[in-house]
Amino acid sequence: MTWARFLLAVVASGVVASFTDWLFMGVLFHGKYLAYPEIWRMKPGQSDSRSILASSLICTVSCAAFIFLCRWTGTETLRSELHLAAIAWIVGPVPILFSNIVWIKMHPLLGVSHSLGWLARFVISGLFAGWLLR
């Protein structure tokens, strides 16, 4: 693994995953965010550019971590990368998101859409890792 190809895979997966974040964590069930407006930091009509930038950076760091995990575990095939994506998804974001749904006043469909966004992020990162780092 060369670091230049690793960085290319990280940047590419970060960019593509930011679009899936927009879809799953922004557009899908958008109206459900307003079901409990008091839990969100941003008020309707307020600029959310800083939050979007911070989320994009977190997205890119998580893509880098997953790509590194793929290489560290020695995944060699698309199937093994997809299995690793599913395992990481079940171990990490799914329990956290649904625990938040239990304890925080959030609409349950937001947990579904956010968890699908995380799955998409891991799958995309695995695909770029397999494509660029073999």
Image (cartoon, rainbow, N blue to C red):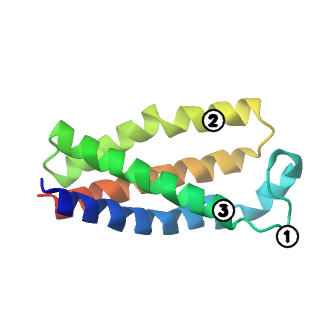
Q: Nearer the viewer, mark 3 or mark 1?
A: 3
- Vertical relation: 112 (above or below) 12: above
Residue 74 in the figure: left or right of residue 106: left
Residue 21 percent location from the top left of the image: 54, 61
Residue 39 in the figure: left or right of residue 13: right
Residue 16 percent location from the top left of the image: 42, 68
Q: Residue at x 72, y 65 (%)?
A: 48
**For numbered disc 3, what is the local secondary structure?**
helix
**How far separated are the C-alphas under marks 3 and 2?**
26 Å
- Vertical relation: 72 (above or below) 3: above
Q: Nearer the viewer, mark 2 or mark 1?
A: 1
Residue 32 percent location from the top left of the image: 78, 56
**How far separated are the C-alphas under marks 3 and 1?**
14 Å
Q: Nearer the viewer, mark 3 or mark 2?
A: 3
Residue at which label 2 appears: 98
Mark 2 crowd level (few <14, some 14–19, many ≥20, 10 Å Cα): some
Residue 99 percent location from the top left of the image: 65, 30
Residue at which label 3 appears: 50
Does residue 28 appear anywhere in the picture? Answer: no
Residue sitting nearer the eye, 49 or 33: 49
Which quarter shows the C terminus?
A: bottom left
Q: Disc 2 marks which amino acid? A: Phe
Q: Residue at x 27, y 60 (%)?
A: 7
Ranked by sequence position, the earlier of labels 3 and 1 is 1
Q: Determine the image quadrant of residue 69.
A: top left
**For numbered disc 2, what is the local secondary structure?**
helix
**For numbered disc 1, what is the local secondary structure?**
loop
Residue at which label 1 appears: 45
Q: Disc 1 marks which amino acid? A: Gly
Q: Disc 3 marks which amino acid? A: Arg
Ranked by sequence position, the earlier of labels 2 and 1 is 1
